[in-house]
Image (tube, grey):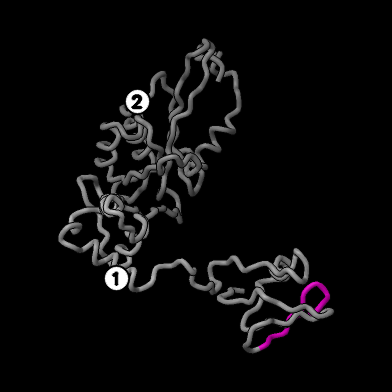
Amino acid sequence: MYMSTMRCDFLVESDLVIGSEGGQDALGEAGGFRFVYRDAEPDSKGTFQRWVRDGDDAVAVDSRTTSARPEPVNSLSEDERAQILAVANSEEFGSLPPSQIVPALADRGVYIASESSFYRVLKAASQQHHGGRAKKPTSRVLTSHCATGPNQVWSWDIAWLQAAVKGQYYYWYMVLDIFSRKIVGHEVHVAESAELASLLMRRASLVEGLAGRLLVLHSDNGSAMKGSTMPSMLEQLSVAPSFSWPRVSNDNAYLHAKFIGLPRLAFGDALGLGRV
């Protein structure tokens, strides 16, 4: 149950808990005893137990963000906010940031508010804007792709296969359809490159007959995924590329599960490729 208000001061008398503030009473039960709360109710039995976990006479203060809290005694008054805006908009300080206004006033023995207070008041008055040559920070909307059928969203990656020679690896290129979990294309090469990946993608699209069909190809941000050859091939095939977010390593889980479950077969020795 969503809570917008609640009371944190209670008076406990035997098995009855009564709210201390005015308002309409409501009756509830928890833990075998009955309690009365005013204007609001606990989210659950566990919520009420947390209220009184330090004893019936020491009810914890409500720490939820939806609770009503009194205004801090040290908050700026309207006159002080008006003074900050007047100083920041004055002819002398109109072109200076708060980081320079406050020290300049301090050199004269004048203190109005801290730098952070200046910034907060200016932002509340819509007077705090991005400046300088640096690009303004932007927040991008998280994008996601949902596959409701086969050949709508593919993902691909490259796994390193250890060879018989220590320090030598072979590279397993795999393209997976995330809806059917079908491996639509895979190859093993002795190098990792965008050219080999683009050729694999071309062959996989021809086998699956994707001409003229919408497809999203998801991958991480490796050099083989972002090399100039791969985006060019995807553009020719009308495939929309999709890349992982920085420092996010678990959004290609279906393909990684295939790599983790790779059996250690000995066919590589028979082919002279080393043990896979």
Asked if residue 214 lies left or right of residue 273, the reply is left
In whole angstroms, how far apart are the C-alphas of marks 1 and 2? 62 Å
Q: Position of residue 66 (x, y in %)?
A: 54, 71
29 is within the stretch colored magenta: yes
Badge 2 element: loop
Specify start and end residues of the magenta stretch as a single range.
25-35
Prevailing secondary structure class for the magenta stretch in the rendered image: strand
Query: Comparing marks 1 and 2, which lies closer to the viewer?
Result: 1
| Residue receiving disc 2 | 193
Give the SS element for disc 1: helix
Location of residue 226 in the rendering, given as x and y in whole percent from the top left corner = 32, 34
Q: Earlier in the sequence, mark 1 or mark 2?
A: 1
Q: Decide whether residue 255 is among the magenta residues.
A: no
Quarter in which the C terminus is drawn: top right
Measuring 57% from the left and 77% from the top, which residue is drawn there?
A: 5
Residue plotted at (24% across, 40% down): 236
Name the mark on residue 214. Answer: none
Q: Position of residue 35 (x, y in %)?
A: 75, 80
Residue type of the residue flagged with mark 2 = Ser
Please tell me in which quadrant of the rendered image residue 8 appears. Answer: bottom right
Which residue is label 1 attached to? 82
Percent x, y of residue 104: 26, 51
Q: Nearer the viewer, residue 52 or 90?
A: 90
Which part of the image, by quadrant, shows the N terminus? Answer: bottom right
